[in-house]
Each structure stands twice: as structure tokens, then as C-alpha cells.
Amino acid sequence: MSTIDSLPPLREVIATHQLSARKSLGQNFLLDLNLTAKIARQAGDLADCDVLEIGPGPGGLTRGLLAEGARRVLAVEKDSRCIAALQQIQAAYPGRLQVIEGDALAIDPLAHLKPPIRIAANLPYNIGTELLVRWLTPPDWPPFWKSLTLMFQREVAERIVAQPGSKVYGRLAILAQWRCDARIVMSLPPEAFTPPPKISSAVVHLNALARPRYPANADSLSRVVAMAFNQRRKMLRSALKGIAPDIEDRLRAAGLKPTERAEQVSLEGFCALARILDS
Ligand code: SAM
């Protein structure tokens, strides 16, 4: 296997530091450095960016990001066993890698990063969606990050990029696509990981738009989308009847049919409805 830097191969790193994978930490490692460099390239031009990486583990993607020219990488890792392995990478890329040992859900990375900021990670699956939702719902837009390049279970990746009419179209698709361009840029079979997970994975790249694709208040949009999809088999007029007494008129004013189901309503339609409900 060819390598992208002068550091030892990842299998050796894992053996040296005894990093047997722990299921409780969602540890499925990527050991092919050509693959991690390929994922890093999907993150866009890194040269002028700080990159936040969650869960570097033994550092395969970290090395990819650094080899692809990231200005700086801030890596947040919960597993203390990985820190010594990451320190070897720090030594090979002086001044360009900062490692924080801790829980990504509890740490505020902003204090350590300078814009422009990109986020790239092979996420622990148990916290992937929670982190994504957090990054997609900052107090102000545009957010602190320019792009997200994230590994998910294939099924979650499909929910993020889903279009109306699809069975997996729902809250996550609306949330992601309202203020981002979102696409699946890579698909990975279980064998790409050590140990292999049961399911396939995919990398999703999300670019933050300067402003929302269609105007709407974030809380109003979130509320109406949640209600509509909570009862996705019902027609909008019954799924949303608790939101306004004159919901049928409001739906028509937003250009929607009261007999439609949430699954059929475009992002533009939901934004129009959120505005009408706020008027
Ligand atoms: N990036 C490495 C790779 O691609 O080989 C490892 C990816 S592995 C799927 C997920 C990593 O996230 C593990 O190293 C795990 O220890 C770490 N992790 C799990 N929960 C975490 C948390 N709450 N905060 C930070 N890191 C976490």
C-alpha cells in the first residue's frame, strides 16, 4: 500500500499503540491512506482553511487532511489511547495539528479555530446526526463553517440529500438543503473499514449557502416540518390541523393542496407555508 507521508502505515500505528477498536466509541477505522486522502480532497481547497476533525482515531483522515495542505487541523478525540499516535503526526507537521482530548459534544471548538473553517470527519455513528443537526442550526446564518465533509451510514446520507417523493425525504433533508448544497460524494462498502461495520457508508459534502435558499423563520419552518412529518401518512390538512384553525386556507395561500402529504411537499413549499403561518 503506498503512503502519503513518511509516517508509519496505520496498521503499524494501531499495533504500536494497541488501538483495538471499541464498539462503544463507534470505532471503525480507515487504514488506507489513499482513501483518506481522497476523502480529504472532497473537503475542497484546504490550503487557506482551518479544519475541525471530530474523532481522528489513529489519524488516517488527519494525515489525509494535512497531506492535502490544510492550514491547520484541530482534532477532537475522546479516546485517550489515540493521543500518543496523534502526537507522532503533530511532530511530522509542526504547528499544523492541535489535538484536544475530550467529547466533541461538550467542547466549543471555536476558541481554537480561525475562519475560514471546514469540518471533515469519519464520525462516530452514535453522535453523527446530533453533531450534524447542531452544525445546521447555529444561532446565526451563515454559520462558523464553510463546508462539512462527513461520513455517515449510507441510510443517513440518503436522508440528508433526499428529494420530495422519496420514502426517506423528511426533516433532515429540509434542514440540510434549506441552507446548504448537499450531495453524496463517495460511497464506501463495509470492507473499507477495520473492523467492517454491518452497513455501507457514504461521505456527504455540504456547502453552506450565504443565505437560506428560500426565506423563512428557522423556528417556524422547523415546527411546521416536524408536525407535517410526524404524521407523514396523513394529508397536510389533518397532520397540521393543530397549527392553525384555518389551515386549509393557509395551505392554499402557500400554493399547497390540503390533500397533499408531507412527503410530496418541496422545500420551497414548506418555506412558503412557514411564512404564511407567520403572517
Ligand atoms: N477518523 C478515524 C478514521 O477514519 O479511521 C476514526 C473514525 S471512528 C468511525 C470514530 C472516532 O471517533 C473514534 O476514534 C472514536 O474514539 C471517536 N469518538 C467517539 N465518540 C467521540 C466523541 N464523543 N467525541 C470525540 N471523539 C469521539
Image (cartoon, rainbow, N blue to C red):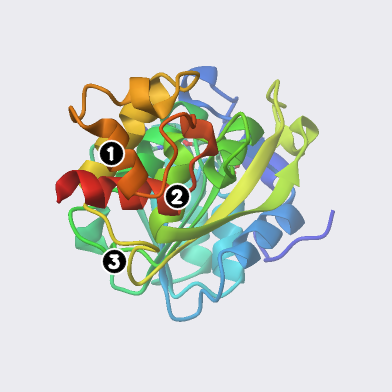
Q: Distance between the residues labelled 2 and 3?
A: 19 Å
Picture quadrant of residue 43? bottom right
Horizontal and vertical percent position of residue 103: 31, 35
Q: Residue at x 66, y 43 (%)?
A: 202
Q: Between disc 2 and disc 3, whose residue precedes? A: 3
Q: Which mark is residue 118?
A: none
Q: Which residue is drawn at 44% across and 75% down?
A: 71
Inspect this view and state whether residue 78 appears. no
Amino acid carrying mark 1 in the image: Asp
Residue that carries the numbered disc 3 in the rendered image:
142
Residue pushed farthest right? 1
Q: What element carries label 3?
A: loop
Q: Between disc 1 and disc 2, whose residue precedes? A: 1
Residue that carries the numbered disc 1 in the rendered image:
249
Q: For marks 2 and 3, give the one nearer the viewer.
A: 2
Vertical relation: 213 (above or below) 107: below
Q: Residue at x 26, y 55 (%)?
A: 216
Q: For marks 1 and 3, give the one nearer the viewer.
A: 1
Q: How far apart are marks 1 and 2 (CA)?
A: 19 Å
Vertical relation: 109 (above or below) 5: above
Amino acid carrying mark 3 in the image: Pro
